[in-house]
Amino acid sequence: MKVVEEPNTFGLNNPFLPQTNRLQPKMSPSAVSGPAHLFRLAGKCFSFVESTYKYEFCPFHNVTQHEQTFRWNAYSGILGIWHEWEIDNNTFVGMWMREGDSCETKSRQTKVNLVCGKSNKLAYVSEPSTCVYSLTFETPLVCHPHSLLVYPTLAEALQRKWDEAEQLLYDELITDQGYKKILKEIFEEAGLLKATEENEVEKQSKKITLEFETVEKCNKELKRDVICQGEAEQEVMVDVSSQGEVEQEVKLDVGVGGDMCPVSRER
């Protein structure tokens, strides 16, 4: 993964310090996703200096913070690694960088808000709550009113799935909650959102249930075929009365795609 560091003589950023003191990411960033016109930002980094801190934002990679002082233990760390999008009302509203450096009992995380601007630049940084940061990134790439719509970024199959969900909601065959659940599954399948552990467990449970039903159905069909084949080997004499009594020999045959052990009659 990409971690931005510039050679300088400030605290832990000193290039002569052991490598073990450098930034250590907990995980690799998620794959690049979202609007294709934003992919050109991948591989680039943008900085912002406030007071004694320098912030670095690398789209689709990470956010880092470096304390610009001569203190021997100046802070330098990761505020978040690219994780997923935040989506609201069919619109990408922010980029979430999660699993940053440890902060007491949790990890640091950062939400990056994309706003229209004349040039690409990191414009504002704040910490609305402990170890949760908010960055504002200006870019002309999001100035068009449709630039952050989610639907156009999806594959055709997922768009059809979304259309079907819209129709079901319109016909009142699903609730608003059910509709939102379907959308969440679509976004996860598209790689825009990360599935939670709870969702992963649910998916595995469904898979196991499906496999069980398939095996059970297979065994049931096999048992039926064995019974039918056994009966097919027997000859049954049937008396037919139609203005006279005629004895006909009828053999049972195993039908395909019909009722269980259908009878074939020859006159």
Image: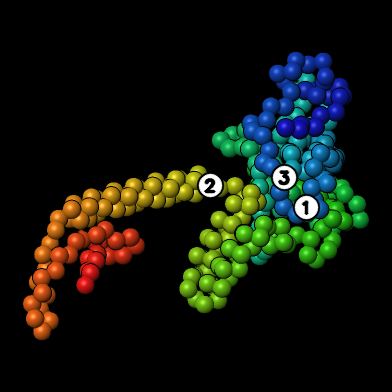
Residue name at image x 24 percent, y 66 percent: 264
Q: Earlier in the sequence, mark 1 or mark 2?
A: 1
In the picture of the structure, the residue carrying the numbered disc 3 is 32
In the picture of the structure, the residue carrying the numbered disc 2 is 196
Question: Of the residues shown, which amino acid type is indicated by label 1?
Answer: Ala
Residue that sits furthest to the right in the current view: 118
User: For the residues carrying marks 1 and 2, which lies nearer the camera in this image?
Assistant: 1
Q: Please determine whether, in this image, residue 75 is positioned above or below residue 230.
A: above
Pointers 3 and 1 in contact (C-beta within 8 Å)? no
Q: Is residue 128 visible?
A: no
Q: Nearer the viewer, residue 249 or 65?
A: 249
Q: Please provide percent x and percent y for residue 59.
A: 77, 43
Q: Is residue 84 visible?
A: yes
Q: Please provide percent x and percent y for residue 124.
A: 81, 49
Residue name at image x 31 percent, y 65 percent: 258
Question: Image quadrant for the C terminus?
Answer: bottom left
